[in-house]
Image (cartoon, helix red, strand yellow):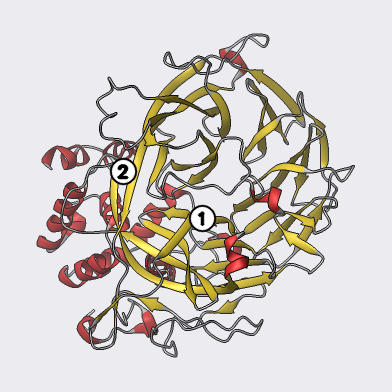
Amino acid sequence: MGDLLGPFHVLDPEQREDTLSHQVAPLTGTERGTLSQIISARSDPLNRLPIELVQEIFHHLPVLNAWHLQHVCRHWRDILSSPRFLATTLARHGRLPVATATSPRNLDGDTIRQAIRQMQAERLGRPFSYYETRVDSKERLGKRSSCAPGMFALCGHSIAYVRTTIAGGSCEVVAHDLVTGQDRVFYGDAGEDITCITLTGNLLGFTSKCGVLYVADLRVQEPPLRVRMPSAQATALTSDEDTIAVLAGPSTIAVYSSNTNMLETYSFTRQVEPLLRNPLQPTNILLSVRHGTIDVFSNGIAVGGPGDERYAKSSGSPMIHYIGHMRFDLCRCHHSEHEPLKYKASSMLELYVANERERAVSNIEALGIGEQYHLRTRFAGDSSASTDWRHDRSVLFDAKTAVLRPHHHSLEKITRNDRDGNEIEPCHELITHPWIRWKDCYYGVGCEWVRASGRSFVSTFLQRPDGLAPPEDEAGLAYQSCIPVATCSRGEYGSAGVSAMFMNGPFLVVFFTMRFGVDRLIVYCFDERVQMAGGRTTGLWGPKAKPETAASSPDTSEQRPVFHYTTARGHVVLPFEDRRRAGDYERW
């Protein structure tokens, strides 16, 4: 541990960030626990540990451990309430999520407390407000073909999705601002089908089957710009700041910049695996304007042989799934205009899964931790919603080191405690795709059945703090809470369900698609500073909040009064709730 803390004694504040980026990422659970003990044992950790490291520990601690640590350490409240703590957050992440949309970036105590409450609300799955809308009876969210990845997007406080008519008419893209409530609708020139969409803070981009890229500037009230692509095979779309990139074919990338209004085309050589007959198939891309790079993700599959040591451990025929990655530099000074791009970094990941069809990287989702991403997969050539292997295996990508790594998680038995402390096992055991991960929180959608009808719900899980040091690629998940969101019949849920889920910190967005019922778009907000247009309070916070109760059948009317909330440990009083603490936390 001394090797970890030693460099900070000789570095000035400007150099800490670069050093920390190389030291915090590989920390194990044991090392984080040791650092927590150091903080608890010292009366003034702020003078002994760098504030960046204290902040990182707080972000990774389970919520109850963090509260206990705050109670043990005499100066913990001063640390979390200091302008220095918030200033460090702004320096590392650029800004607090959506802070500029509703409030200035001041460094007062209220802003500090609100930021901490947001972290803890996310970990408990306890939103402050929610927004719900139903699609018109003449239109539906995500027709069956529109359940494919790339038809939904979330960025900042804006969401975008593809909407079609029931009769299969023309497609349209809807961009909705959650703060202002403004809707903007965009079409292709010929009303053609839309294949992919992408969204930044300023731009909305979407491609059509006619080989056209449409770019709309959301800051102005103008129709989208029409750009002809080199190929009609647009399989993936990504964006960053004022730039949009398209994977146009198996070995072509098209990059459009709104600053220059120019479309540049690049070619590259596909990644090769010696055990495969053909090169890997590119399926998705990730753009970074700041670094001037683009990452290409590919996939391939082979059958394992008896000579492989993992063959005996697999039931059935083990399939070797290859997930490949290549990083290219888009600066023209590094390559000739007429030559293919040469990769500057590459990696390959092998996953053994028995009796599984080939998987392709469909969605790339930020984890909210540095530059780490979750690569969500789906069956290759299938338009179904994105899933993961058996719902317990996933692939993570570290953009800073350009390395792929597997990640496994195990779900503990779902239980909760009643008012007398007795353990109760809820009847909802079915957790379906998709899983969403944000920092150390996992959000899943499930369904429970009562006779012929059922209800879907969003459950929250945390990485289980069991005191052990699990491998870095494994995590145990502990159930925290659930909120029911919709009712349905077996026939409705059996052939539809959740089309997509997104998380970016303050917002958790869920797109529900029912076969016979109405389609729903539900947004949960974990930041009390954000006032969503048309949003309603959940009633789970403040002095008038109702205690957590067993979730009964929710009211499906438009005037649903309050959320029913089921938790794993009975009532918990949160820090800063009603400006005071209760029970064992009275001495805060």
How would you rate the neighbour count of disc 2 (Cα within 10 Å): few for under 14, some for 14-19, many for 20 or more?
few
Residue type beneath disc 2: Pro
Q: In this view, does 169 lie above or below 357?
A: below
Q: Is residue 58 above or below residue 191?
A: below
Which of marks 2 and 1 precedes in the sequence? 2
Task: Specify the quadrant that holds the N terminus.
Answer: top left
**Quarter-of-image position of residue 134:** bottom right
Q: Mark 1 points at which residue?
A: 504
Q: Distance between the residues labelled 1 and 2?
A: 29 Å
Visible in this render: residue 102? no
On residue 13, the disc is: 2
Q: Residue furthest bottom?
A: 544
Residue name at image x 52 percent, y 36 percent: 361
Visible in this render: residue 392? yes
Nearer to us: label 1 or label 2: 1
Q: Where is residue 433 in the image (x, y as percent from the top left)?
A: 49, 55
